[in-house]
Image: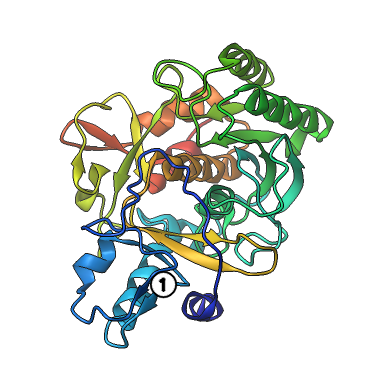
Amino acid sequence: MRGLLRLVLGVAAVVAVAAEPSAERTDDGPYADVRFKDRSADRTLDRAAIRAMRFNTSTKWAAEVRPLATDVFRRGMDPGLGVRSLHAQGITGQGVAVGIIDQNLFLDHPEYRGRIARYKDVGCNQRRASMHGPAVASLLVGRNIGTAPGATLYFAAAPSWTRDAKYQAQALDWLLEVNATLPAGAKIRVISVSAAPSGAGSPFNAHQEMWDAACARAAAAGVLVLDCTQHRGIIGPCYYDLDRPDDLAQVTPGFPGRPMEAGRKLVLAPCSRRTEAEEYDEGIYGMQYTGRGGLSWSIPYAAGVLALGWQVKPGVSPDRMVELLFQTAYEKDGFKIINPAAFVAAVRAES
């Protein structure tokens, strides 16, 4: 952890375009994006203002402000909701295979180096890595950040900027091909997809039917796919209190500054006030903090919690895992908030 905090304070990187649909990208205001910015002239920033911002290891702060930013960075590494207590019990997702379909990344970031068993680029063809891929990988299997740091990750890189769902479908089919070669005790259990490749509201305007067909093949193979689609998605956004990250009563549905109105049929998982891995050029490692993130960050969080359950009881079916995720959720104002400890306990009690 100390090494990671040194990384937070000292590493430079290069900017890339954000891809998560619900995040703000402004240079000023309460949710300002100040990654790669020089804010050293502003000596009046308080912790509340910093907590709402989006910044990274290349943001320059005034000497008086830097300790506050470092503290927010550190607190944002905690998955919260009791996840670290589960890790302390040895429940880390060890022995569970998970998948991600997202934008391209390099494999050497300290958060997930050695955790990605197979990687395939399905149409990204970029010389530089994305913002999105490293972030979701670290939120799922990151050593200091992830909900399931012991899980084995299979990663398929697919371009979302083309708005063509054929790439996501091809990525899913590749993961299913890999899965077919894995021994019975090492099959991929859940695939995290921080995108909505089909259905109402989807930004993808080509080959949506290919995504739905690939998801049907995944279901037939016993692989759970978590995506952001309206017709298939089961995960929604929320955020915890940085000072009391394990207190479910302090979790707020929705996004900071955007109260949740719909979504009472979903299970909400943290997406804001989180710190994630960042690497645009190979070997130049950084971190970013997202004061107000998008649903993109909730999906790998939930996939990681499911992986914790499969470590405890490998024989539970995907459908039953989803049922238990809903049944054990913490109820607040009519919303269901993911409750990792209660979920793992319920899985453990399964016959």
Secondary structure state at the residue bearing disc 1:
loop
Q: Splitting the image into 4 quarters, where does residue 218 fall?
A: top right
| Residue 86 image offset from top left, x and y in percent | 46, 56
The residue wearing badge 1 is 59
Compared with residue 286, is residue 261 higher up or lower down, i.e. above or below? Answer: above
At x 42%, y 30%, the residue is 324
At x 79%, y 27%, the residue is 177
At x 73%, y 27%, the residue is 176
Q: Observer-nearest residue: 315 or 270?
A: 270
At x 58%, y 48%, the residue is 133
| Residue at the outermost left position | 333
Q: Splitting the image into 4 quarters, where does residue 56 fall?
A: bottom left
Compared with residue 24, is residue 11 higher up or lower down, i.e. above or below? Answer: below
Q: Splitting the image into 4 quarters, where does residue 50 fall?
A: bottom left
Answer yes or no: is residue 89 visible.
Answer: no
- Using residue 1 as the reference point, say whether residue 345 is left or right of it: left
Q: How is the image coloured?
A: rainbow
Q: Observer-nearest residue: 164 or 314?
A: 164
Q: Which amino acid does label 1 sit on?
A: Thr
| Badge 1: residue crowd in 10 Å (few <14, some 14–19, many ≥20) | many
| Residue at the outermost bottom position | 63
How many numbered marks appear? 1
Answer yes or no: is residue 100 visible.
Answer: yes
| Residue 78 image offset from top left, x and y in percent | 41, 62
| Residue 19 image offset from top left, x and y in percent | 48, 43
| Residue 158 image offset from top left, x and y in percent | 65, 36
